[in-house]
Image (cartoon, coloured by chain):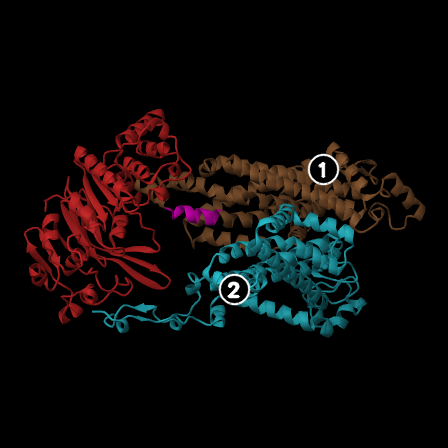
Amino acid sequence: MAHFLGRRALHSAIALIGLILAVFFLVRLTGDPTDLYLPIDASLETRKEFAHKHGFDRPSTEQFFVFLKDVSKGDLGYSLRKQRPAMELVLEAYPTTLALAGVAMVLSITLAVIVGAIAAYKPGGVFDRISSIASLAGASAPDFWVAITGILLFAVTLRWLPTSGTGDLPYWILPIGVLMLRPFGLMVQVVRAAMLGALSSAYVKTARAKGVGETAVIFVHALRNACLSVVTVAGDLTVGLINGAVIIETVFGWPGVGKLMIDSVIQRDFPTVQATIMVTATAIFLLNVLIDLLYVALDPRIRHQ
Amino acid sequence: MSEHPILKIDDLHVEFRSGGETVHAVNGMSFQISPGETAAILGESGSGKSVTAAAIMRLLQSPPAFITGGSVHFKGQDVLAMPIAKWREYCGREIAMVFQDALTSLNPVFSVGWQIAELFRAHGVASGRDADARAVDLLDRVGIPDPALRARDYAHQFSGGMRQRVMIAMAIALGPDLLIADEPTTALDVTVQAQIMELLEGLRADSDMAMILITHDLGVVADVADNVAVMYAGRVVEHGPVAEVLARPGHAYTRALLDSVPRTHSKGHKLSPIVGSPPDLARIPKGCAFNPRCRFATDVCRTGAPPRITVAPGRIAECHHVEAVYNDN
Amino acid sequence: MTTADQESLIIRRGSPWWRMLIRDRFALIAALWLLILTLCFLFGPELFGEAATKLNLRARNLPPGSMEHGWLMYLGGDALGRSMLARLIVAARNTLAIALVAVFAAMIVGGALGMIAGYVGRGIGHVIMRFADILQSFPSLLLAVVVLYVLEPSVGNLIIVLAITRLPIYLRVTRAEVLEIRERVFVDAARALGGSRYHILRRHIAPVVAPTLLTILTVDFSIVMLAESSLSFLGIGIQPPEITWGLMVAQGRNYLSQAWWLAFFPGLAIMMATLSGNILSNWLRVVSDPEQRWRLEAPGDSTPRKSAGKNDV
């Protein structure tokens, strides 16, 4: 088990380091990093001053070590637009995104488990068909278009919901609803396949032969095994949710990390862009470690390898 | 045959429909067993023996399996007609089953102690720590060393033989009156096989439990069973007391099976396997299903269904040429 | 006694692909729609280019549903009176081209890297796999946003970025298949006969891996189309004067309350294209799986698989 966890953590760590390095090299790839920070029409003098102040005119190796030192201290630069440390901006925006993504994840997994389990229990039945259509729609629908159509229908035409912004429940319905589409579609298929496999397995046969009631057979024997498949996909799910959050936050004007990223790109505020990447990469690394721990907790076979 | 068999199967028919094809797995299987009796169901793979067992326990998944005819009576109750929830009350408590592959038949995410204790919990006999304690007792009874410790282990931490003992512990936990053992030793080493059969025999004798032993192993049948039913292509083609059937079979298939066993004392003798291969159950031959492979076959075998002939008291064989087979020794 | 002539093996012929397509109503519609899109791709800009740019101030913000100004204006007109339908048809080329090129590039490069990683293993293999890990563990949209920020959003860069984000899946699948095939006898035979590694990869392994990759490609096409649309919608993908459906949605968003069709129809076009792609890839999966094929085969097309003797039914 330690071997399994250790190896996985090492891989994730390498991925994280690789990403940080990639960001460093990417910025210097185009030659002059000043272009990324200053407006297009900045004068030559401003550029030179800027380059000198931020050490861009030093040899690359020196820049690299300075970069590493800064990163380890948590100093990810200063946002020129907002006149605040970039890290602060990012950490301020994260709770909004976490709330959005968190609720969407919990809701989609819960619904997917219910629909997927019932779909697997009666293949070809009503629930099964709902699950197929839902997955197909989730995988095919452009979320920004669904969001806009949703706003058009529910906010502009019917006036049931607000068009954008944060607040209490009505403000959450459209954003969460649209964000949930793809993860739900994906999860429903995963749960359905896992439950189909579990329900036709030999150990479920044994449970029935023992006289265990159908409810326990489905929700204890089968579901507990299907969980493993869900956890396996959890990482991809979260990454997909972050992607979705970028769009949803932009369309609905939620001040989360996604919107921060897009705004920073449009305003050419590179330190914030860089800081967002770093923090997100670290968060994903931690998440992967957590998922692996969860996997070990759920599957006794791995514990004894 | 006793007047009140504990299990009675009458003309059972089971079909599998998938891929546009219909496979006739069980074709008019009739069988009965009395309390305390050990009966073997002998047959090759594809003979329908495991499907029959699954049908009795109502473990078949519909689709693709469909019970299209016949009846099963357990202690006088119509098994196939009663609501499934009611039948589940019998399962584990009065009738139990041991499966072939213990590794896949045990749930990998729960400890074996938990799974045995589940029997007590599910049938309302005991709960919590009481159930766990009884589970440990059972592990001890089936010969697992350090039972208290081992109860917390998982299926993959046991060897094949130990796992099968766990399966047996689960089956006898509530003292069932009938135990169905579906190829309980096929997946095991020969030495372990003997131990498991010994265990089963011992447990059965202790509680006067009836046992249906499903197997393709003639040796096991000869050792343990009182009566044997030979199955071919979904039907019982011969049945009777073990000693008599194996000494002088009345059906050509039984004869061929016995002939195909390699004999240690006839060195230099050619092996005589049964020619051909088991029939495609989607296309069963007309007349007697065994006719393409039978050395006694004549034209009548290819056209007409064989009659049920009483070979001797308590012995039935379904063959056009019973006499020829019986006297060919 | 059974002899060889009594046992006959009749090989199942099965239905031709078009018959199986017809039997699946949804797949048929999806295929037809993709055919229409292909026609738009090939001839769209030439045939409708003028209509897409022609200003018609009388049809300014014309709502859809009327044939007053001709059939071209059935889907409505934009702020300058240009035909929505014509603009959609013209934008199809860019939208589809970018997705297609990106997806093929990903397949080829990812497949090649996967083959190297699988066949060579050891050092290079590990490096390639860690590289795939980095790509796959990070949200592709954010990655694309950053790279396009740094490199300027041109069509070429956009395609490269999209291709890179899809690399890992082809890489992993290819590597897995290569690892399995590598151990098979015919590869040993080729090696014994002196085949070089490149030769073995190209002639023996690639043909076996290709069908799997193509199946993945059909699903990936939809994913890449959605990704490009998202990027263009955010303003980071395609830049004017180039146009794709995603960008049209972004442009239409400003007029949501007055002219909803400006944002609605381009998005609908994206959805219909990706939906068709996904439906067809489901169909492909059923067709290429021998155990599922029977659902789509016509009863008369296949013959019995095996007869055990001359006496059976």
The quarter holding residue B99 reads top left
Using the image as rendered, state which of residue C203 and residue A194 is in the foreground.
C203
SS class of the residue under badge 1? helix
Q: Are marks 1 and 2 in contact (CB under 8 Å)?
A: no
- The amino acid type, in three-letter code, at marker 2 is Phe
Q: Which chain is red?
A: B
Residue A300 is inside the magenta segment: no
The residue identified by callout 1 is: A93
User: Which kind of residue does numbered mark 1 sit on?
Assistant: Ala
Looking at the rendered structure, whether the residues under marks 1 and 2 are on a common chain is answered as no
Residue drawn 59% across and 62% down?
C198
Residue at disc 2, secondary structure: helix
Q: Residue drawn at (62%, 70%), measured in percent from left and top?
A: C36
Q: Left of C229 or right of it: where is C285?
A: left
Depth order, front residue of B282/C5: C5
x then y, percent, for residue B276? 24, 64
What residue span does the magenta drawing correspond to?
A: A191-201
Q: Quadrant of residue B86?
A: top left
Above or below residue A43? Residue C11 is: below
Picture residue at 58% right of the left edge, 57% below the top: C115
**Which residue is at the front of the view, A298 or A68?**
A68
Compared across the picture, whether A215 is left or right of B269 comes to right
Position of residue A272 measured from the top left corner of the image (x, y, whole percent): 77, 41
Q: Position of residue A185 (x, y in %)?
A: 55, 50
Q: Position of residue A303 (x, y in %)?
A: 47, 35
User: The residue marked by circle 2 belongs to what chain?
Assistant: C
Tell me the shade of chain A: brown
- Name the front one of labels 1 and 2: 1
The hue in which chain C appears in the rendered picture of the protein: cyan
**Label 1, label 2: how many angstroms apart (C-alpha)?**
44 Å
Point out which mark residue C26 bears: 2
Residue C103 in view of the camera = yes
